[in-house]
């Protein structure tokens, strides 16, 4: 039975080849089959995942952006970054922001894999729509065991993409690049297929559903107004005007995707 406590332990590192390692972590200790194992807590994991996402979006994670993304005070972020650096998950260089170390990146990719597999599982088994998936996956990704995640992966037929079109990191830590380019940068006149949408805001996903836009929809950019104005799209028999901000959260492949996948709808 896991029980909460604050620990400072010296124990074998969960990562091969790193030998013994001291960790001070707020968390749960669990007597697993391989002896004592310290699980990272949800909040530490959320920080690591947020740094990973910001590194993809902005090439680095700043204290300010982390505070905004996690909805916490700057002082809390500063304290946590110090802690994560002392644990070897991040490197923090003045004016260069926070970057994950290889160790931090492995934790992040494992979380992203869990998150995306859980979203696909909920969508396939319970037919939840794409706007209903994220919040529950945010919670479950921290709780589900490694073996259950691998069972889910096999049950789903070793999928490569989640219901929002995002690549699912593989177990070995490799991950396919984000598909396509943002719609607000897609060439005018070109035909493309919607390949990925941001999963962060359910309201945004419901808006796309209302516009009948989904993963696999074929679109053509007609016109892009200057000064970050709206983008006019042809989709099916309809012409849609979509704002710059919404367009930046949609990624489009050139041409037809050729039925590469159909993970949603
Ligand atoms: Zn999600």
Image (cartoon, rainbow, N blue to C red):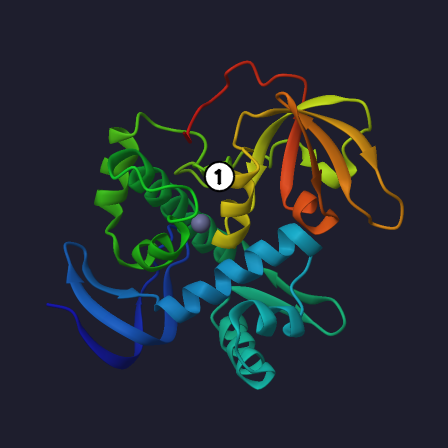
| Image-based side of 163 in relation to 14, left or right | right
Q: Where does the image place residue 234, in percent across and percent down from the top left?
A: 70, 26
Which quadrant: the N terminus?
A: bottom left
The residue at the far right in this view is: 226
| Image-based side of 174 in relation to 219, left or right | left
Residue drawn at x 75%, y 40% as measured from the top left? 184
> Label 1, on which residue?
164
Q: Where does the image place residue 212, in percent across and percent down from the top left?
A: 54, 33
Q: In which quarter of the image is residue 12?
A: bottom left
The answer to whether residue 143 is above or below residue 115 is below
The residue at the far left in this view is: 1
Asked if ligand 1 lies within 8 A of label 1, the reply is yes
Q: Where does the image place residue 33, in percent across and percent down from the top left?
A: 14, 54
Residue drawn at x 51%, y 35% as measured from the top left? 165
**In-front residue for pair 44/10:** 44
**How many dots with numbers?**
1
The answer to whether residue 182 is above or below residue 12 is above
The residue at the far bottom in this view is: 75
The answer to whether residue 224 is above or below residue 238 is below
The residue at the far front in this view is: 238
Q: Where does the image place residue 117, in percent across and percent down from the top left?
A: 36, 41
Residue drawn at x 73%, y 74% as measured from the top left? 94
Q: Quadrant of residue 24?
A: bottom left
Residue drawn at x 25%, y 52% as measured from the top left? 144
**In-front residue for pair 52/17:** 52
């Amino acid at each position: 039975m896991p029980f909460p406590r604050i620990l400072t332990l010296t124990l074998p590192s969960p990562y091969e080849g790193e030998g013994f390692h001291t960790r001070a972590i707020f968390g749960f200790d669990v007597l697993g089959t391989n002896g004592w194992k310290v699980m990272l807590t949800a909040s530490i994991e959320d920080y690591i995942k947020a740094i990973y996402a910001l590194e993809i979006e902005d090439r680095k994670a700043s204290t300010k952006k982390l505070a905004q993304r996690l909805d916490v005070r700057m002082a809390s972020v500063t304290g946590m970054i110090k802690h994560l650096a002392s644990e070897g998950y991040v490197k923090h260089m003045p004016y260069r922001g926070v970057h994950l170390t290889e160790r931090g990146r492995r934790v992040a990719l494992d979380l992203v894999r869990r998150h995306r597999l859980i979203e696909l599982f909920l969508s396939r088994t319970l037919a939840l729509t794409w706007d209903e998936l994220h919040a529950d996956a945010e919670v479950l990704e921290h709780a589900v065991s490694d073996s259950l995640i691998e069972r889910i992966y096999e049950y789903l037929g070793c999928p490569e993409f989640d219901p929002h079109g995002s690549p699912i990191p593989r177990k070995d830590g490799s991950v396919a690049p984000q598909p396509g380019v943002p719609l607000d940068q897609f060439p005018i006149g070109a035909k493309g297929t919607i390949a990925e949408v941001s999963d962060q805001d359910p309201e945004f996903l419901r808006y796309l559903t209302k516009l009948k836009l989904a993963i696999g929809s074929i679109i053509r950019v007609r016109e892009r107004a200057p000064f970050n104005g709206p983008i006019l799209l042809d989709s099916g028999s309809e012409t849609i005007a979509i704002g710059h901000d919404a367009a930046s959260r949609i990624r489009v492949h050139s041409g037809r995707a050729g039925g590469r996948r159909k993970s949603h709808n």
